[in-house]
Image (spheres, rainbow, N blue to C red):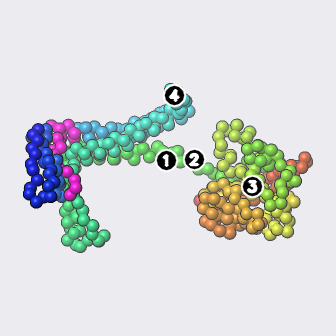
Amino acid sequence: MSVNSEAAAPGSGGDQHDALDTQDAHGVETSAHAQNPLAPGLPEHRLRRTDIDPRAAKRAERQVSLLFAIGALTPIIFFIGYVYIPNDKLILIPLIGTTSASNLFLGLTMGLGLFCIGAGAIHWAKKLMPDVEEVAERHQIRGTDAERDLAVAQFNAGVESSGFGQYKLIRRTLIGALAATPLFAVPLLKDLGPMPATLLRYTIWAKGVRIVTDVSLAPIKPEDIPFGGLVSCVPANLAAVEKATGTLNARAKVPVVLVRLRPEEIRSQQGKNWDYQGILCYSKICTHVGCPTALYDQKSHHLLCPCHQSTFDLADSGHVVFGPAARSMPQLAITVDAEGYLVAQGDFTQPVGPSFWERG
């Protein structure tokens, strides 16, 4: 490497600049102050090893092809694992704990396959595709016919220069990887079923089930709720159901709110005598997309969903007065048991939560 210093030309204001001339590893002289004429402000374009060394280009081609080949094989391995690994098989992973062998295998093979396709595309672009910096001037969105013809020509030239037609091994492995990738989704379609049938129509609320406060699970008497008050509640049998099933599925549909109005404030209900001494019980799950609702305006008796502002009038059968919700808030008929605690008269008479196609 040689370093030469030149004085600034007379009339330059006395500034002096050092022009550093260097040679790269291939003997190509470059200047530290040289600029790319096609992209002002960027350094002068320098050739990559794969641009001047056919063996390096061939090696890069094999590397890219190997990544694409792995991307083509992993969906097949994924499919085999999905079929033959039992869903209930568990394995212990140090520092993580016990997990499903099937889920772990499927996640690793899918992740590896998609990673190899992406890594192969990046390696191909960085090592074999043209890397010359260019500047595209702004123009109107729609070009002239001549510009469109030029765009098509440039696209075809880009396809040709990318080597898609030249590197047959890359082309074939890439096509194989992309063709096999949809296999990831085929087994997963099976997991979309079975259909829920009537599971979405019913909850664990039943006749005589006590209404208890959420979290503390304390039973409630009518005198515990003041006029204008609101209490978030769940059924007393929820904890037992969750323990028996080992899931929280039941909790998704059972939360309710108790509100107490004066009898003359209640304009309508979804059923005759579904309240008890002015205490109304409504589902807490918004009929739009299932968000929990608990923002209550005591004066208007409106229940507001914080997600998309659907508003329900609890004094008028829970009808929607604002927002995207399409159905009224389901009402639960209530009464008291022999000990004076609030209980349900039965289950909801309509599905709780968001609407769905099979609702009818």
Q: Which of 31 and 173 is in front in this view?
A: 31
Q: Residue at x 89, y 49 (%)?
A: 340
- First in residue order: circle 1 vs circle 4: 4
Q: Nearer the viewer, mark 1 or mark 4?
A: 4
Q: Is residue 257 visible to the viewer in this orientation of the structure? A: yes
Q: Are marks 1 and 4 in contact (CB under 8 Å)?
A: no
Q: Which amino acid does label 3 sit on?
A: Val
Q: Mark 3 points at which residue?
A: 257
Mark linked to residue 95: 4
For the residue labelled by badge 2, is the local secondary structure a helix, a strand or a loop? Answer: loop
- First in residue order: circle 4 vs circle 2: 4
Taking the image as shown, residue 17 lies to the left or right of residue 223, namely left
Q: What residue type is labelled 2?
A: Pro
Q: What residue type is labelled 1?
A: Leu
Q: Nearer the viewer, residue 28 or 51?
A: 28
Q: Distance between the residues labelled 4 and 2?
A: 35 Å
Q: How far apart are marks 1 and 4 (CA)?
A: 32 Å
